[in-house]
Amino acid sequence: MRAFELESVEAVDQAVSHRRVHDGEAFIAGGTTLLDLVKLDVMQPEKVVDVSRLPLKRIETLEDGRLKVGALVSNTDLAKHEIVMRGYPVLSEALLSGASTGLRNMATTGGNVMQRTRCPYFRDPDMPCNKREPGSGCSAIEGINRNHSVLGTSEQCIATHPSDMCVGMVAAGATVVLEGPDGQREVAFEDYHLLPGETPEREHDLKPGELITHVILDAPRGGGQHYLKLRDRASYEFALASCAAIVTLDGDSVSDVRVALGGVATKPWRATAAEEALKGQPATQENFERAAEAAFADAVAYSHNGYKITLGKQAVVRALRDATAAARA
Amino acid sequence: MTTDTGKTREYNLSAEKPRIDGTLKLTGGADYAADRNLPNQTYGYPVTSTITKGRLVSLELDDALAMPGVLDIFHHDNFDQLSRSPNSFAEENLTSEPRLPFEDNEIHYQGQYIALVVADTFNHARAAALKVKANYERDDDFLTDIKSLDSGEGDLPGEEQPGDASSLGDADSALKGAAVTVDQRYSIAQESHSVMEMHTSVAQWENDMLTIYESSQGVVFQRNALSKIFGIPPEKVTVISHFIGSGFGGKLFMWPHAIMTAVAARRLGRPVKTVLSRQQEYLATGYRPTSLQRVRLGADESGKLLSIHHDGCNESSPAGKHDDTVSGATPKMYDCGGNVAVTNRLVDVNKCPPCPMRAPGESSGNFALETALDELAVKLDMDPLALRKKNFADADPASGLPWSSNHLQECWDNAASRFGWDKRNATPGAMKDGDEIIGYGMATQSWEAMRQHCSARVGFRADGSLMVACGTQDIGTGTYTIVAQTASELTGIPIEMIDVRLGDSSLPSGPLSGGSFATSTVLPAVSAATREALSQLKTLATAEGGVFENVDADSIELENARLVSGDKSVEITQLLKDNQLGLIDGEASARPGDEQEQYSFRSFGAVFVEVRWDAGISRLRVSRVVSTVDIGRAINPMTARNQVEGGIVMGMGMGLFEQSEFDHSGYPYNNNLADYIVPVNADMPHIDVELLDYPDYLHNEFGARGVGEIGLTGIAAAISNAVYNATGKRLRDLPISIEKMLAP
């Protein structure tokens, strides 16, 4: 680990204004991603600004029914919050399927949005990686890519977005609130994470100096909700494929549906094609399978991750089935 | 003096006793190697090769040397001239990697040490290590995976090891004449020990004496090896390892980091502490080598085995040879009409040397043999348990010697009954529960019962406590506790008053903590040392003016911390006080004897597994495990059961998850605990372990055969066999990962 300067701030404007804007600075909240990467010498900040004392730990319902979540609300507190458990069970399930209790106690809402990929080649400074070192090449495309993406990939990068929480938020619908040197702005959650394309080093719609202060969840969609995470072992592993599903029924037909995918894509993935395939259709196994096919119609397999296309479809079918059952319950 | 000896003695052997070091471990009081901080200490951090094969051309050190706190950097051009250890198991100086650190500039594997940075703090050392730049001459003609060499038919790849080949009867002819045959190939991926406590050396020289604190399963072996390497008498080297946070074989024989650390400490004249990182542990401290196997079985139509061929192949390394002898135990397992032939081969790969990993060889070989038997049972349309019972060996088929004690048939019956094997439907996929298909599988478990020589010292103290000392280790298995139980049983001194000293090479020479032989080896030495100390006590007591003057020493018994003869008795503490002595002690040795030529010693067991396969989401889980093992006497059934349970969990890892992966460029893809998948608590099914209690007094006076490895054997085959019962898929390559289950 290289030495860095640490500065603590007490107010949001202080955090934003005090932050001299260049690549050598990083915010730290829970530290569960940043400190790992600093120890691995993947991130080498000269200065770290500790934002963990900012007053961003509240969860409040807005007048329009949306839920405003402070960026420093821990994953545990968010998952266990009464309104979240009742109105956004898919998000609560997604949060609780991630990491371990200890990590969820430290990890924050804003930090999780900024979580970085677990691609082993990204996490080793000795290996070529376009995300870490633009232009150096992608080691995963020719190397081992069992854990890598089949959706949203480019010739520059196939690294998987690791978050469960973000998949739940894409399904629930949300907005990221940013505070920066030029004031406040909002970005739709599903637009916040960027596809790797030609610039895999750019992961977010985040301008220099900006800080996530809140995530605002859309008003609860009701319906039946389910988050299904598939992985090798039963706990403490990133998803190989996951699906967040929200199904609203009108009789036996699907009147509305949201499908988001994790573990298979370069960003938290909204499966719009699957939603379109299912909307207005009877909630049957055959239609769930059609939706799953639509979700992976554009999938590209690499040498070791072809199984993820099958596994991802299975996640969609089962999550839709169980969300539908919840809707009927 | 009192004649009251009526107190009921605490029953200590075969008793369920919590670990006596449990409180220390729970409260942070146990001093692991990395907890050691010495005055004026410095910190070493290794720099490792990032290429897989080739030559180190040069090191650029200026930037690193200019970093804060850096004291020195050791490498090939400035390292001390040392000698290799003779590397003899018999002389107890075996090391894992005979090559000395920085011996030359050849790179044999990725992760090989190329320099050691020493600085005033750990963070300074690590930060400076990142600044070392290495220039290499890369050789792309390397090998990290032997599976690619297997043509899929005929002989396995590699060089045959003549010492491993054994042949009885005429296995070839018997196979040709067999009505039903199986000929299949199996493979097991490389596994890492993934120890909880990182490898650590803290080295200090005082004058010409070296003390090294290490996380070691063999302090005596390491002491002897360091003595040879540095060319100093063994009395000048002390290796201390009071507590070990698991070793699983990876800490049996010293690795080069200890040598680098000792050299740096000598050169700097200051203590040096080196704690390896997880990534370094995965690359430079051994592993269970990838193995390839071929098993051929022949049987008649009734299921009587007529012939067994078992060929094995495992990875070895140019940096150190390791032969896992995966087929080695096969000739001892079943009665196959006396026709059995086994071979083993080695292939060098560009990785650090492999080394033993819990149940080395046998757990791998067992997977292939016990899966092949399941395949034979399917061909015979026979119950897999009935097939095994039909071929029970009532004497060791390899040597012809009688078993010292063998209750395998009871293991099969008990475990089958508790599991409910009779409810099994042999048709694949026939047992269902909601989304899940249920599968049942079983396998025989086995591990050789070994015993080594050992010395120990036992001392009675005036304060009423008893000191027991032996240069072996407790690697977390409960050795401290069973030594205390045994000493308490022998002397009547309560277990709380027994002070067990282990993990120090200056103590009387004790065995490695490995091979499941520590219990059978150490306890007889403790017994002999107790007798020796007792004889000193008797000499005191029968001396002129003593309590038992004129009493025949042979009539004096030790009971409840007293010497007793007839209606007379004396407390040992009183005897010591009367003689103004603080301590009376005795040292003695014990070793196996002629029984080794007269009997075959082996533990057996049976394991039954239920798996659940949810085809809709490709989820395979182990839902139930039942095992009965015959390990002779369990000195402490609580810690013994825990060993079997731990072995079962590790076997689940072998069966379902664990594989160290290297990509086409030789890059170690998953050298960390997030990407190298081991079972976690949520994967644990209900595990039901029964220990039979048949003391094996032919093996040693306590009847204990040891228990560390046997739980790991059988489990992978039982899982694979259960998967077949659930799905009709025969998975012969471990681990049984999701993509293998999904493959057509």
Image (spheres, rainbow, N blue to C red):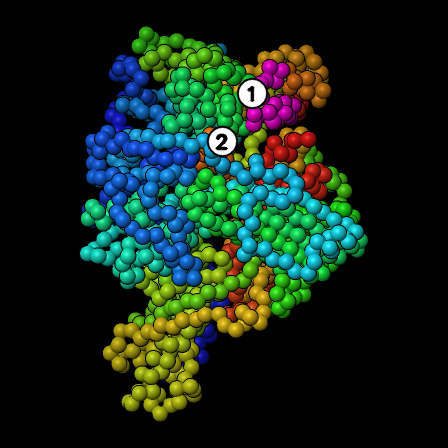
- Please name the amino acid that badge 1 sits on: Val
**Alpha carbons under labels 2 and 1: distance apart:** 19 Å
Are both tags, 2 and 1, on one chain?
A: no
Residue B325 appears in the figure = yes
Q: Residue at label 1?
A: A150
Q: Residue at x 40, y 16 (%)?
A: A135
Chain at tag 1: A
Q: Residue at label 2?
A: B663
Q: Position of residue B60 (x, y in %)?
A: 27, 31
Residue A102 appears in the figure = no
Span colored in magenta: A295-318
Q: Residue at x 58, y 21 (%)?
A: A301
Q: Establish if B696 lies above or below B88.
A: below
Q: Nearer the viewer, residue B157 or A162?
A: B157
From the viewer's perspective, tell me whether residue B692 is left or right of residue B241: right
Q: Position of residue B525 (x, y in %)?
A: 42, 70
